[in-house]
Every structure is written in structure tokens, then in C-alpha cells.
Image (cartoon, grey):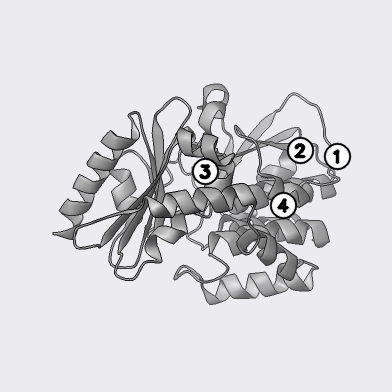
Amino acid sequence: MRIDVKQCAALLKEHDDILILTHAHPDGDTLGAGFGLCRALLKIGKRARVINADDIPKKYAYLYADMPQYDFDEKFVIAVDVATENLLGELAESYAGKIDLCIDHHMTNTEYADALLLEDTAAACEVICKVICELGAEVDRDMANCLFTGISTDTGCFRYASVTPSTMRIAAWLIDMGADNGYINRVMFETKTKTYAHLERLALDGMEFFYDDKVAVMTVTQEMYRVTGSNEQETEALAPLTRQIDGVEIGILIREKPDLTCKASLRTFESFNAAELAKAFGGGGHAQAAACRFDCGVDEAKRRIIEKCGELLK
């Protein structure tokens, strides 16, 4: 059932012992949305907590610092920034078919939850901001940091075409509420670990080009993690690099998983729809940023996705 912001806030007010699910391989938007909403629910007297299938990268620790940790049997389950249940990773085994509410901004959402608040915004945290305001929760500095983080990271520090005047107004309001935009943008976009720098060098060295250099493919393997001391948590910044090469229209990052299956992150410009490309392999996302999974090795996944790119480029 589709609902609006007012109905969403009313639903949240009716329930307690609320569990918030964020998507696997968590990024700033899903974490900012999850912890931002959680802080708001705590403010209005609810018990709530956030969980994720994967470890949260250390750079996001400020999102949940000093939050009380409640132990309860959940009575209401929410997914934020999760377009399909399989994006929950291992959490899907426990919660698929049991999600009461989804708050999302992906138009490829499969409507798996009992209630869905879906708005086509640049970041999920824009929708969360509206819900929090409707709840009447006072937005403090910590909450503002969560929400600003989600908006900044999902818009590439406000560089993407998805950014609207509303996006900028909400971001400015969050700065008014105390969001430390300088610190957040520095940590998210300018600070790199030595292990990531080593991984980035190897990934760039191995980048391949296809179809008159219109398609760039970068791969990250388990061996590369071993050699560099890096891990999957540090790969978030790699996908945007694939479309920064002049002439590239479709950028692809393929990451090998420990079980030797893989995930592809897709980045395109306005001439190609990344979500449609991902959909061909059971994934989804946005027009210029999407993802999909492959139950096969890197080489086979690369062959299949390059073949599909060739069909789109005709």
C-alpha cells in the first residue's frame, strides 16, 4: 500500500519497539536515513534501533555515537533506502516478507513492504527529513549530521544531476540545524586510508575499456583485498571513478564477494539509464547510479554485462 508523509508519521506514532533495516554494503544515505530516523523516534519517546547485515565502515561512526542501545523484541520493522528485499543481504533471510514499512526514493522499488512511502528524490534522507518534521521531533546537531551525510553522499557532494532546488534547501536547513558540513564532506570525499589508496591504484591499473572507450570496467577481487589489506567497506568511492574518464558513458565496478559471486555498481550519464541496465540482471537503482548481483564469477559477470552494454550502445 502506498502512503504519504502524513500517513507514514501517523503509522510511526502508533507503534513502538521499532527495528530499522539498512541495505547491505551500507553507504551514507542508508545509514544517514536509518540513524537519522532512529534518533527522531528516540526523541519522541519510542524504542528503536538500527541493524545492517555488514559491518559499518569506521568513517560513519559519528552517525551513531552516544546513541542508547535498546534490547527488545521488534514489533514493527522498517526498511530505509532499500529498493528490493535482496539488497538487505543476510538480513533478508530473517525479514523477507515481514517488513511493515519501507521509506525509499528508488523508483524501481518492488513494493515488498506492507506500507511504502516512495518519493523520487536525490537522497532517501530528503524523504526522512519530511517524515521527521511531520513527527514533530526536534532536529538536533547529531540528527542533522546523519541527514546531511545521506544527502551529501548520495549526490556526490551535490554534483549529480539528481540534485534539485529542494535538495539544496533541505541541506541548507540541516546546516542551520547544526550539521557540520565541512567535517562531513572532508571525511566522505577527501580522506582516504592508506589501504584504500593502494586498492584504488590496483583497480585503476586494471581498468578496461570497451566499445570505443564508451564503457569502462573496473574489477576488485578478493586477492586485491588480501594484497592491499583493504576490504569491501572501502570500495564505495571506486564506482564514481569509472565515469570520470573523458568519453566514458557507462562505468562499471565489479566487486568479487568472499563466496566468489560478485556485485556490479553502475554509473552512467543522462544518455543511458543505469537502472534499466541493472534491471536486466535483477537489480535496480537510479537513472545514473544502480547496482546488481551475479551468482557467478567476475569473468562471467563481466562478459554478460559488457554484452548487454553493447546492445544498449547500438
Q: Amino acid at mark 3?
A: Val
The reply to whether residue 13 is in sight is yes
Q: Residue 288: x, y in percent? A: 39, 60
Q: Is residue 216 left or right of residue 87?
A: left
Which residue is at a point 47% across and 44% down the rendered structure image?
A: 83
Which residue is at a point 33% across and 38% down the rendered structure image?
A: 282
Crowding at dot 3, Cα within 10 Å, few <14 / some 14-19 / many 20+, comes out as: many
Which residue is at a point 80% across and 37% down the rendered structure image?
A: 47
Q: Nearer the viewer, mark 2 or mark 1?
A: 1
Tag 1, which secondary structure?
A: loop
**Which callout, 2 or 3, points at the residue further toward the start of the chain?**
2
* Residue behind mark 3: 82
Q: Residue 58: x, y in percent? A: 71, 45
Q: Is residue 160 left or right of residue 43?
A: left
Distance Cα–Cα, label 2 vs label 3: 18 Å
Distance Cα–Cα, label 2 vs label 1: 9 Å
Q: Quadrant of residue 66?
A: top right
Distance Cα–Cα, label 1 vs label 4: 14 Å
Tag 2, which secondary structure?
A: strand
Q: Amino acid at mark 2?
A: Ala
Q: Name above or below for residue 220 compared with residue 169.
A: above
**Which callout, 3 or 1, points at the residue further toward the start of the chain?**
1
* Residue behind mark 1: 68
Mark drawn on residue 48: 2
Crowding at dot 1, Cα within 10 Å, few <14 / some 14-19 / many 20+, comes out as: few
Q: Residue 51: x, y in percent? A: 67, 35
**Which callout, 2 or 1, points at the residue further toward the start of the chain?**
2
Distance Cα–Cα, label 3 vs label 1: 24 Å
Residue sitting nearer the eye, 83 or 304:
304
Q: Amino acid at mark 4?
A: Gly
Mark drawn on residue 36: 4
Q: Name above or below for residue 77 compared with residue 33.
A: above
